[in-house]
Image (cartoon, coloured by chain):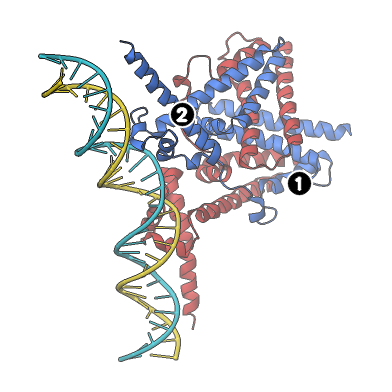
Chain colours: A red, B blue, C cyan, D yellow
DNA sequence: TAAATTATTTAACACTGTTAGACAAAAGTA
DNA sequence: TACTTTTGTCTAACAGTGTTAAATAATTTA
C-alpha cells in the first residue's frame, strides 16, 4: 500500500519544516537566540523529536550552510548568464554575491562566520587609537588632502581595510589559501592602492 | 593607614587576573568554551565573585576588545614610526595589522567578529557549486589560462573575494560606511582587478 | 483482538549566565 | 576587650541551553 510513501513524504516535510523554523527564528532574533526548544515550539513538537531528523544542532546548521551555498550559486549563475562578455560576467557575479550577502544576511553570516558582536567601538576608545585614526593621516597626506575625515580618504581607507580584513577572515575561517598566495595578494593590493593614491594626487 | 591602598591594588590585580584567565581559556579552547565558572576556577574563586568586578560576561568581552584595540594601535604606530616615506608607512601599518591578526588571533576574532564554524565546505557541496567553481572559469578565460585551478587564477579569485567579503563583513559588523562609499569601493575594486587581468593577458 | 512497531513525550543530566541570601572575616567604634 | 558594621566570599537556586534514556501513546502488523 502507498501509505509508506505518504509517511515518508510527511517525514521529509518535517525535515524541511525544522530548517524553515530555524531560519525564521534566526531572521527574527539572530543566531544567538536559536535553540532546539524554540525550533520544536515552532513546529509544534517537543525538542527530542528533532533528534529523529538531525543528529544534533550542528547538523542543522550544516544543512542550512549547504542550503545557503546552493542559493548563492543559483544567484551567481543567474547573474553570469545575463552577460556575454567575460568582464561583465565577472562583475555581475560579484555584484550578485554582494547582494546575496545583504538580502540573505543570516545565511551569509553562517556560511562565512561573520559574527555581530558589539557595535560602536569608536566612542569607547581613547581618541586616536582606532586603526582609522592611525592610518588616515598618512593616507590623507599622500592624497594631498588636509582633512583626514574627508570622504575621499575614508573611501581609500576602507579599500585598504576591506582587502586586508577580507583576506584575514578567509584565512581564519578556512585555511585554504597558501602563504605564498596570501603574501602576493596582500602586497599587490596594498602597493596597488597606494600607487593609485599617488597618481591621483599627482593628477590634480 | 596605607592598607586601603594595598587592598585597592589587590582588587585591581584580580580585575586583570580575570581578563588574563579569560584570554588564556580562549587561547586554549576557543571563544565558545569561555564560561564564568571556568574563569572563576582559574583565579581560584567561585563564579559570583566575578560579578564584583564586571557587570556581566559581556563587560569582560568588551574590556578584552578594548585591550585588543590598544594592542593593535601600538603595533601599527610602531610600524609607522620605522619609516619616513608615506607610502612605506602605510604599507608597514597594514602589514602590522595583518601580523597582529594572526599572532593575536583571539583578540582579532573578538574585535572584528570573525567566527570559526565549520571548516571544509567544499567536499560537502555538489561539484561546481562553490563560488570559486562558478567564478574561476570566467577569470581563467579572461587571463588566457585554460586550467581554472591554476595558481594565478586562484590568486586573482582570492583578490576579488577578499575585497568583496571584507567590505561585506565590515558592513555587517559595523554599519559605519555609507552606501555611496560602499558602491564606489566595490565597483572600483572589481573593475580595477578585472582591468589588470585583461592587461596581463594582453601583455603575454 | 493481541502483539509488535513506531511516534512522541516526560524526566533527567550536565552545562550555561546570573542573582539572592547565608556565612565568615575584617574593620570601626564604644 | 566586646559589639556593631562593613566587606569579602560562598552556597543554593533560577531559568535557560544541548542532549539522552526511559516511559507512554498511537499505529501498524499478525
Eyeballing the image, is B57 above or below A197? below
| Dot 1 or dot 2, earlier in sequence | 2
Q: Dot 1, crowdedness within 10 Å: few (<14), some or many (≥20)? A: some
Q: Do labels 1 and 2 share a chain?
A: yes
Q: Dot 2, crowdedness within 10 Å: few (<14), some or many (≥20)? A: some
Which of A184/A70 is in front? A184
Q: Residue A85 carries which label?
A: none
Residue B32 spot, x, y in % from top left: 49, 42
Does residue B195 appear to the left or right of D30 in the view shown? Answer: right
Residue B103 spot, x, y in % from top left: 62, 30
Quarter holding the C terminus of chain A is top right
Q: Name the residue under label 1.
A: B137
Which of D3/A1 is in front? D3
Please identify, in this view, whether the residue under mark 1 or under mark 2 is nearer the observer. 2
Instruction: Specify the quadrant of the image occupied by residue B48.
Output: top left
Q: Residue at x 49, y 14 (%)?
A: A127
Residue A153 is at least partly visible in this image:
no
Badge 2 marks a residue whose secondary structure is helix
Q: Residue at x 53, y 17 (%)?
A: A129
Eyeballing the image, is A23 above or below C4? above
Q: Callout 1: residue from which chain? A: B
Which of D3/A201 is in front? D3
Q: Which residue is drawn at 60% across and 52% down?
A: A70
Badge 1 marks a residue whose secondary structure is helix
Residue B183 spot, x, y in % from top left: 60, 30
Residue A184 is at least partly visible in this image:
yes
Q: Residue at x 55, y 43 (%)?
A: A108
Q: Name the residue under label 2.
A: B19
Does residue D23 appear to the left or right of B135 in the view shown? Answer: left
Q: How many labels does the image show?
A: 2
Amino acid at each position: 500500500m502507498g501509505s509508506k510513501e505518504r509517511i515518508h513524504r510527511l517525514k521529509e516535510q518535517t525535515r524541511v519544516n525544522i530548517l524553515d523554523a530555524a531560519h525564521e527564528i534566526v531572521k527574527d532574533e539572530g543566531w544567538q537566540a536559536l535553540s532546539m526548544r524554540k525550533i520544536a515550539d515552532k513546529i509544534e513538537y517537543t525538542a527530542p523529536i528533532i533528534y529523529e531528523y538531525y543528529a544534533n544542532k550542528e547538523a542543522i546548521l550544516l544543512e542550512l550552510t549547504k542550503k545557503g551555498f546552493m542559493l548563492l550559486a543559483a544567484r551567481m549563475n543567474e547573474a553570469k548568464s545575463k552577460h556575454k562578455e567575460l568582464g561583465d560576467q565577472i562583475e555581475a557575479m560579484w555584484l550578485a554575491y554582494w547582494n546575496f550577502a545583504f538580502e540573505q544576511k543570516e545565511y551569509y553570516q553562517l556560511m562565512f562566520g561573520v559574527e555581530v558582536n558589539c557595535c560602536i567601538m569608536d566612542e569607547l576608545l581613547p581618541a586616536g587609537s582606532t586603526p582609522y585614526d592611525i592610518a588616515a593621516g598618512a593616507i590623507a597626506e599622500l592624497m594631498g588632502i588636509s582633512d583626514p575625515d574627508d570622504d575621499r580618504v575614508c573611501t581609500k581607507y576602507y579599500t585598504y581595510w576591506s582587502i586586508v580584513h577580507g583576506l584575514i577572515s578567509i584565512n581564519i575561517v578556512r585555511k585554504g589559501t597558501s602563504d605564498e598566495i596570501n603574501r602576493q595578494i596582500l602586497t599587490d593590493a596594498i602597493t596597488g592602492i597606494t600607487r593609485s593614491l599617488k597618481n591621483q594626487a599627482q593628477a590634480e
